[in-house]
Image (cartoon, rainbow, N blue to C red):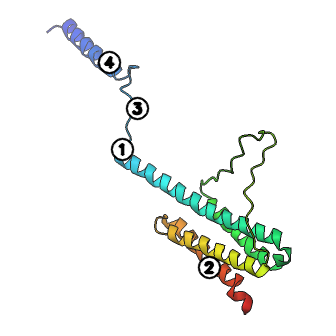
């Protein structure tokens, strides 16, 4: 084979290789890439954790609303309830860290957007301060039980936080009822 023949063969081979490489770069995309099983599982786990965090934050914020309602109805209880309320507010903040966003309540469809400020429905509070404290203790136990139940599916670091918040809620319930008698 002559030099010219070899060059022609080499040029033809390079051209064929370049054409094959460019064929993969065409605009004809076969469609979106399907996620792998590991990617789908990671997405499922992330969604489950976000839902868990949202439920935990919501439980703590509901409890915080209960404290605010009792304090509004019975201002004389402020010295006793304010430290506990501060603790519940710190728990709600800590539980919401890490990407959890709690959506505000939606406004009524007839309200104008410029003047709408979402506000939760008023929390009913017993007229008797002692009964209000018992109701608040029951709300603390409910939130504590919700945090304890969430431990089963929580990732390790969040589970430690939930356990701590649940224990604090149990202590608050004690302080609101039995602790007052001591």
Kindly identify the residue that appears in the image at 69 percent across and 47 percent down: 106
Q: Which mark is residue 32?
A: 3
Kindly give the residue lying farthest to the left in the view shown.
Answer: 1
x then y, percent, for residue 125? 75, 70
Quadrant where the N terminus sits is top left
Nearer to the camera, 100 or 78:
78
x then y, percent, for residue 98? 59, 57
**On the image, numbered disc 4 is attached to which residue?**
18
Q: Could you give the CA–CA distance between mark 2 and mark 4, rounded to whole angstroms?
A: 71 Å
Kindly identify the residue that appears in the image at 77 percent across and 76 percent down: 81
Of the residues under marks 4 and 1, which one precedes in the sequence? Answer: 4
Q: Could you give the CA–CA distance between mark 1 and mark 3, rounded to whole angstroms?
A: 12 Å
Q: Which mark is residue 36?
A: 1
Of the residues under marks 3 and 2, which one precedes in the sequence? Answer: 3
x then y, percent, for residue 20? 29, 20
Q: Residues within 10 Å of mark 4 (few under 14, many from 20)?
A: few
| Circle 1 SS class | loop
Quarter of the image where one finds residue 65: bottom right
């Amino acid at each position: 084979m002559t030099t010219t023949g070899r060059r022609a063969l080499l040029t033809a081979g390079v051209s064929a290789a370049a054409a094959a490489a460019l064929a993969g770069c065409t605009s004809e995309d076969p469609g979106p890439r399907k996620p792998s099983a590991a990617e789908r599982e990671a997405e499922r786990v992330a969604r489950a954790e976000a839902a868990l965090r949202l439920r935990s934050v919501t439980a703590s914020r509901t409890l915080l609303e209960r404290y605010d309602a009792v304090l509004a109805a019975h201002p004389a209880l402020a010295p006793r309830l304010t430290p506990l309320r501060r603790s519940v507010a710190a728990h709600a903040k800590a539980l919401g860290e890490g990407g959890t966003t709690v959506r505000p309540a939606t406004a009524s469809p007839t309200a104008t957007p410029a003047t709408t400020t979402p506000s939760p429905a008023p929390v009913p509070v017993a007229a008797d301060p002692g009964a209000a404290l018992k109701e608040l203790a029951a709300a603390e136990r409910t939130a504590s039980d919700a945090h304890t139940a969430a431990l089963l599916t929580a990732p390790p670091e969040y589970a430690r936080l939930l356990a701590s918040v649940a224990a604090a809620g149990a202590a608050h319930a004690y302080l609101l009822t039995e602790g007052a008698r001591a």
